[in-house]
Image (cartoon, helix red, strand yellow):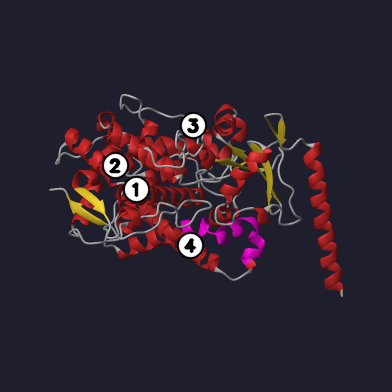
Amino acid sequence: MELSVTLILAGLIIALLWLFSVKSRKHMCLPPGPTGLPILGNMLQLDKRAPFKTMLKLSESHGPVITIYLGLQRTVVLVGYDAVKEALVDQADDFTGRSPVPFLMRVTKGYGLGISNGERWRQLRRFTLTTLRDFGMGRKGMEKWIQEEGKHLVDRINSTKATPFDPTYFMSCAVSNVICCLVFGQRFSYDDNNFLSLLQIISETLKFGSSPWGQLYNIFPWLMEWLPGQQHKVFANIEKLKEFIMKKIQEHQDTLDPSSHRDYIDCFLTRLSQEKHMPTTEFHYDNLVATVLNLYLAGTETTSSTLRFALNVLIKYPKIQEKMQQEIVDVIGKERCPRMEDRKSLPFTDAALHEIQRFMDIVPMSIPHYALQDISFRGYTIPKSTMIIPLLHSVLKGEKQWATPWSFNPQHFLDTNGNFKKNPAFLPFSAGKRACVGESLARMEIFLFLVSLLQRFTFSCSGGPDSVDLSPETSSFAHVPRKYKIIATPLF
């Protein structure tokens, strides 16, 4: 009897809170949006496998700035290039907040660069950008590392001897090794079982985050912690990844030479030692572990997924692959390692690689932002503690910015003379002060790895171009490309 009364009272309280929030919407001049249900909000209206599609549809009737409720979480969605740019670039200071996404909070406890705010975010971002640049991110030093890793990747693919193989782990190993060189100061063998198991964890983590189950965790974390399900296995596996990182940090601590830094961890440990008596410092062990985890996760799976998707595209459109190969061989030849300076002489190849990223639309809803205080935007008020979704999907597939947004078309990045042209709506790495810190590294990897592969191989699959489906295997947080066994036929 007492339990029934408690449940009824709880239900009434939630209903009253919901009614209050609906009235507050009008009072605070919130952006318009669809009416939702108590507790569930607008969840039942969203496509659970591709919520960004519903958000795009809702903008047709409610405009480019809309309010929805993901459970009890008030959320403002920015739709289209103009709204996203105005927020993230023109009003950058107002939109620097990062949402405390429950899944990421559970993994990092709020530490690290990824979802921190305020002084923690400022200190860690400034340090991370400076340190990665010092180790060559976007420069010649990093170019040499990627070129060297590209040779390992070519050799491994060559060992398949033109028989069908799954490229997933080859791509993951190559990309992860670049991050490992930056962060850990070492690369790993493609046959290292421990290394492969870590890559498997990273892959499964992204899939979970992009699944309906993962999205449900972010909306009702308290419920999902109590219910059985795959989330418990995912969190247990992430702990293994953190244990690996902590082991590497200890190895660095034992061999640290403050006068000769080998990698990111060395630089952080030295700064930690220098500021250990400062009460306001953010250079402590928890932030080191979480930031290295951020870099390792983000720097491995998104870029390797882009490379896998690129191979699917090349198989789907063999004439585009052939045109890229011809341009590469004409400019670079068959032997010399590709260099970043070659990009300006490879306009069609560069355009195709940009179009691969645009068409893939890897993180359609970006990583959510957060209102750290009330924000005035386009005549509306976005109240403090509101989650903000810059819908990158609507930017990369916007009909005003792209001639054929729903088709793969390298001409989007070429002028009438065949020269490469930029498009301001090309924002796969987001924009503003929260844009991806590894953008220059990812761009370099995508160019050097794919040009190296096309210089050596023609890619196909046994089912032919028509058997390749470019739609993602899973959507939501990230677009995960479908897996195919492909054939790499040497060009010479």
N-terminal-most mark, 3 or 4: 4
Q: CA distance from mark 3 to mark 2?
A: 22 Å
Q: Which residue is mark 3?
A: 401
Horizontal and vertical percent for residue 188?
29, 56
- Predominant SS of the magenta segment: helix
Q: What's the amino acid at mark 3?
A: Gln
Q: Quadrant of the N terminus?
A: bottom right
Q: What's the amino acid at mark 1?
A: Val
Q: Which residue is mark 1?
A: 313
Q: CA distance from mark 4 to mark 1?
A: 35 Å
Q: Secondary structure at mark 4?
A: helix
* Residue in the foreground of this view, choosing between 243 and 453: 453
Q: What's the amino acid at mark 4?
A: Glu
Nearer the viewer's eye, disc 3 or disc 4? 3
Q: CA distance from mark 3 to mark 4?
A: 43 Å
Q: Residues within 10 Å of mark 2 (few under 14, many from 20)?
A: some
Q: Quadrant of residue 472?
A: bottom left
Tell me if residue 208 is in the magenta stretch: yes
Q: CA distance from mark 4 to mark 2?
A: 43 Å
N-terminal-most mark, 3 or 2: 2
Residue 391 can be seen in this image? yes
Answer left or right for 314 relative to 93.
left
* Residue in the foreground of this view, choosing between 472 and 403: 403
Compared with 233, 413 (above or below) is above
Q: Mark 1 and mark 2 in contact (Cβ < 8 Å)?
A: yes
Q: Residue 320: which numbered mark, if any?
A: 2
N-terminal-most mark, 2 or 1: 1
At 20% across and 38% down in the image, what residue appears?
Answer: 326
Q: CA distance from mark 1 to mark 3?
A: 22 Å
